Amino acid sequence: VVTMTTKFGDMVLLLHEQTPKHKENFIKLTQEGFYNGTTFHRIIKNFMIQGGDPNSKDSIPRNDGQGGPGYTIPAEFRPELKHDKGALAAARLGD
C-alpha cells in the first residue's frame, strides 16, 4: 500500500504482487521523485484520469501525454485483474 499526496488530497494505492515489474517500477520512480510536480493532464469525467507525464511540468500542454522515463517495461496482463473503478494502471504502447 502506498499513499500519494496531491493538492486535492491523499490517494491510497494498492500495488499488486501479481504485477511485480510494474510495482517495482512505480516504487522506483516515486522514490526518485519522477512524479513530483506532474499533473493529471487527461481527465474524462466518470471514466478516468491520466497523470505522471514529466512533460506536464512544462508550459506546453500539447506535449502532455507524450513523455516518460525513457524506457518501457513488458506488459503484465493478468486475467484475474480488471480495470474496475478506482484501478491504477500504467500507460502502454499499442500492440
Image: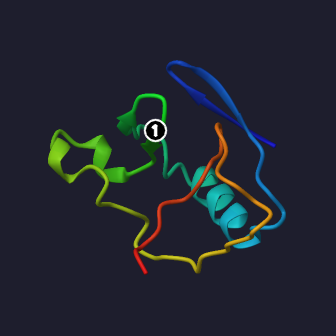
View extreme (top): residue: 8
Q: What x and y, as percent, mark residue 61?
A: 18, 42
Q: Nearer the viewer, residue 56 or 47?
A: 47
Q: Nearer the viewer, residue 80 or 27?
A: 80
**As displayed, is residue 58 above or below residue 8?**
below
Which amino acid type corresponds to the residue marked 1 in the rendered image? Answer: Ile
* Element on which disc 1 rests: strand
Determine the residue positioned at 48% across, 29% down: 46
* Label 1 Cα crowd, 10 Å radius (few <14 / some 14-19 / many 20+): few
**As drawn, is 10 to the left or to the right of 69?**
right
Determine the residue positioned at 23% across, 43% down: 58
Q: Nearer the viewer, residue 28 or 19?
A: 19
Q: What x and y, as percent, mark residue 92?
A: 47, 68
**As displayed, is residue 11 above or below residue 79?**
above
Determine the residue positioned at 32% across, 60% down: 67
Q: Quadrant of the C terminus?
A: bottom left
**What colouring method underlies this structural image?**
rainbow
Q: Quadrant location of residue 29? A: bottom right
Q: What x and y, as percent, mark residue 1?
A: 81, 43
Q: Nearer the viewer, residue 79 or 88?
A: 79
For mark 1, what is the residue?
Answer: 49
Q: How many marks?
A: 1
Q: Quadrant location of residue 60? A: top left
